[in-house]
Image (cartoon, helix red, strand yellow):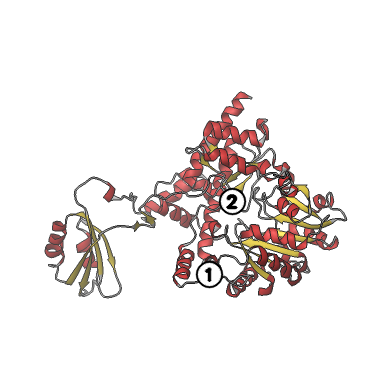
Amino acid sequence: MNLRNEILKLMDKNGRIDFQDMADMLDTDLETIKKTVKEMEEERVICGYTTLIDWDKVDVDERVTAMIEVRLTPQRSYGFDKIAERIYNYPEVKTVYLMSGTYDLMVILEGKTLKEISYFTSNRLAVIDAVIGTTTHFVLKKYKEHGKVLTEPVDRRMVVTP
Amino acid sequence: MRKDILSDKIVNIAPSGIRKFFDIVSEMPEAISLGVGEPDFDTPWKIREEAIYSLERGRTFYTSNAGLAELRQEVCEYVERQYDLHYHTKECVITIGGSEAIDIAFRAILNPGDEVIVVQPCFVSYAPCVILAGGTPVYLDLSVDTEFKLTVEALESVVTDKTKAIIMCFPNNPTGAIMTKEELEPIADFIKEKDLLVVTDEIYSELTYGSRHYSIAAFPDMKERSIVVSGFSKTFAMTGWRLGYALAPREIMRQMVKIHQFAIMAAPTISQYAAIQALTQCDDEVDEMREAYNQRRRYLLKAFERMGLDCFEAKGAFYMFPSIQEFGLTSDEFAMKLLEEEELAVVPGSAFGECGEGYIRISYAYSIQELKEALSRLERFITRLREKR
């Protein structure tokens, strides 16, 4: 058993898992769990903790998720990394991936209005020299995120069975 | 109206001890349960998807009595791969769950007066099936002293010249006990020496922790004496699909298929197609479920240890069988009081045979969060009981 992997698998499913519970589940002790998690935090294996939220259930202003495909010409000696950096440094950018296939970067913006996203695309992204083109997709409905279906699970089993 | 409308045989069989408990719990909507004998996982989607596809394709006809040839082939290959068991498709029948397989196994081999050693604690249906098939159950009570494992000494104490067969189940429901190859070998020798048959219920065979399951039918010369019962319910979280199978030498299988043919016709076609996916495509899903069960098992063991609740380390199925003898209550009383005071349902050990008295069965087919809440109720309850004593 690779303890680090086991811890990560459990924390990936439940970031708030109780460390003592995790120690029991993995047949080790609390101190070992604390130490291993701390190490992984320091090594940036664990980069942070977030909460999975269904914003549709929250009464707030319009929140839009946009996925923008970005096509690039790579820069000499830097490749794509420098351009990615110029994009991911904007705080409104939630996620940036380098992709294989018909485009190069996937840029995900979240929690913004349509207006703000179109502004970002035309005035921030499109003006970067290396950017050849963008295609913006808006998310209409989220069904599943981070391995979790966003509806409540129900236990349909009978309460006692042989 | 005449007075003798009912069969004495069935009237004289007591209803399952779980039944009455179930009726009470059903009236308590707030109660939480550790009483379920089925996986909490959903059937893997690829299996469900295959069933939908089968429906779309209009595969809604009967299959052959013994089951789809393709599925039987996969069953034979699966048990060869996993347990080194060598069966021909003609030695395999697809049944309505493991339960039907147990029923037709006894009906195929028993004559009036034949005794069957029923190794207890065990699943509730074994003895009734023996009786309904015209045999006589002889109960063999295991104890925690052997970690609820079967021993030759125990067998010797109940075997007679009328003994025809033994029914046993490892990994065990309700104790979670398993038996290793080394522990099974003398049992197999005993069976051969006494010229007995064995009905071996291996429905939990994929759920062992720390060692691989070994089938008693895999020892030399044991195939001809064994009826292996298994199914899809526990391994692939497919309880509601009602699909199991039995493996037996041709001579026995021919009779089993005959009974199955007259009583059942054939297992559900949609379930059978889906089961092919289960056997061929779901190794990763099964590994993942096994790992989750094992984490919960360790979690429970530690929790019992902290509560000071006496429990041997079960290494199979998804059950724990802690002792409640220190509280001076019967299993029934303990479970009822726990339900009334903390709204937590567990199954009294006595529902699985007399030797289950003094124990409760705790299922860990629940998420850690659910287990945590249930355990805090259990701990509160036993703390109160201890204070009173």
Label 1 vs label 2, nearer the camera: 1
Seen as rendered, the residue at the extreme top is B388
* Image location (x, y in percent) of residue B367: 49, 48
Check the image and report above or below for A31 versus B84: above
Query: Is residue B311 in view?
Result: no
Q: Is residue A150 or residue B292 the one in the foreground?
A: A150
> The N terminus of chain B is located in which quarter?
top right
Q: Which residue is mark 1?
A: B273
Q: Which residue is mark 2?
A: B318
Chain that bears disc 2: B
Query: Distance of mark 1 from mark 2, alpha carbons?
Result: 27 Å
Using a 10 Å C-alpha cutoff, classify the residue at mark 1 as few (fewer than 14 neighbours), some (14 to 19) or many (20 or more): many
* Image location (x, y in percent) of residue B160: 86, 53
Query: Is residue B254 in view?
Result: yes
Q: Amino acid at mark 2?
A: Phe
* Quadrant of the rendered image containing residue B352: top right
